[in-house]
Image (cartoon, helix red, strand yellow):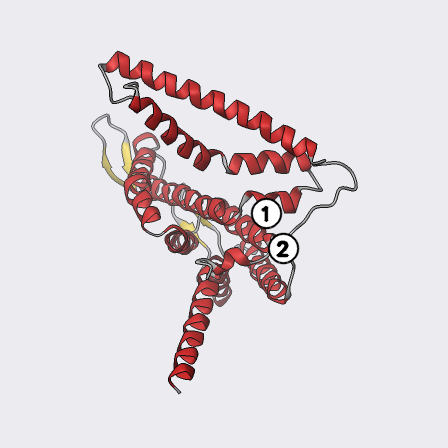
Amino acid sequence: MNKDSFSGYHPLINMLYFTLVIGCGMVFAHPVCQGLSLLCAVSYSLCLNGKKALRFQLLYLLPLLVLTALMNPAFSHQGVTILTYLPNGNPLTLESILYGASAAVMLITVILWFSCFNAVMSSDKFVYLFGRVAPALSLLLALTLRFVPRFRAQIRVISAAQRCVGRDVSNGGIFRRAKHGMKILSILITWALENAIETADSMRSRGYGLKGRTAFSIYRFGRRDAYALFFLLLCGGATLAGAVGGALKFVYYPMLGGAEPTLWQLLAFTVYFALCAMPLVVNMKEDVHWRTLQKTQALSLKT
């Protein structure tokens, strides 16, 4: 059984979902929207990558969050609510602190959404979506998506081979280590260039990008994809309507201010949360369905 049921949807659904959540995550500055988006991004990242995602969030994203939040009040002194004065005489304002926290949350949220995007949108999905429209661009994006994981795996192989002959970055003094590191990097770059040439030649020999060329595809747009598309269009349209109508507006300078709490604003928050939480709901629904089938099968075997 697939760990993430949302990944099994049509590539168009996956692409539309991440386009909406990443776009909204980079635009919406309202604290409620940012909190909802961050919560869903963290949950979905843990659902996709498990302990690996938790370690990444604690070791890298949490310090980045704190650092980014502290940088803004250190350099920006706008705002009307002065809390105190720094040793250099510049004021420390509440607005600059909250804006720094908002920018940090926005940055972390977008990084998490992109990590989920990288896990769900495989290279074959990219080629399927954009292969006919922009074959060169789709191939470039597909290779880019594979860049980090393949390079990490290859550099481990190169480092292990160099370690066997005493040329790893852990051998010798600082200058010898640097020399060994440059050697490993040189080998990696050479391998990457050769791999890129081989991939380009392979795709050219298969007629990739030629007019009228057909391609095998395992993706079919079914009924559940139609329901998902309708849901995404409905929630995305309602969220954008709320943003255009000012229900999701929030400013930090020169003083904190946002739209008045109304039923329309509550509805916009609810729809936005439903949009961000769509993969989690899909996974929970499939998990419940799977457990029900298992219980039904167990009872049938007992009887």
Few, some or many residues within 10 Å of mark 2 (<14, 14–19, 20+): few
Q: Residue at x 34, y 35 (%)?
A: 72
Question: Disc 2 marks which amino acid?
Answer: Tyr
Q: Residue at x 72, y 36 (%)?
A: 209
**Can residue 192 be seen from the camera position used here?**
yes
Between 256 and 165, the residue placed more toward the observer is 165
**Can residue 80 be seen from the camera position used here?**
no
Query: Would you say 44 lies left or right of 27 here?
Result: left
Q: Are marks 1 and 2 in contact (CB under 8 Å)?
A: yes
Work out how far the residue at label 1 is from the one at label 2, CA to CA, in angstroms.
9 Å
Query: Would you say 168 lies left or right of 250 here?
Result: left
Question: Residue 55: image x %, image y %?
Answer: 30, 45
Few, some or many residues within 10 Å of mark 1 (<14, 14–19, 20+): many
Question: Residue 294: image x %, image y %?
Answer: 41, 74
Residue 84 lies in quadrant: top left
Question: Residue 296: image x %, image y %?
Answer: 43, 80
- SS type, badge 1: helix
- SS type, badge 2: loop
Between 164 and 209, the residue placed more toward the observer is 164
Residue 125 disc label: 1
Position of 237 relative to 184 (above/below): below
- The tally of labels here is 2
Residue 219 disc label: 2
Q: Earlier in the sequence, mark 1 or mark 2?
A: 1
Quarter of the image that includes the C terminus: bottom left
Query: Would you say 253 lies left or right of 54 here?
Result: right
Residue 110 lies in quadrant: top left
Question: Residue 181: image x %, image y %?
Answer: 34, 19
Q: Residue at x 47, y 47 (%)?
A: 119
Residue 114 disc label: none
Between 31 and 156, the residue placed more toward the observer is 156
Question: Disc 1 marks which amino acid?
Answer: Lys
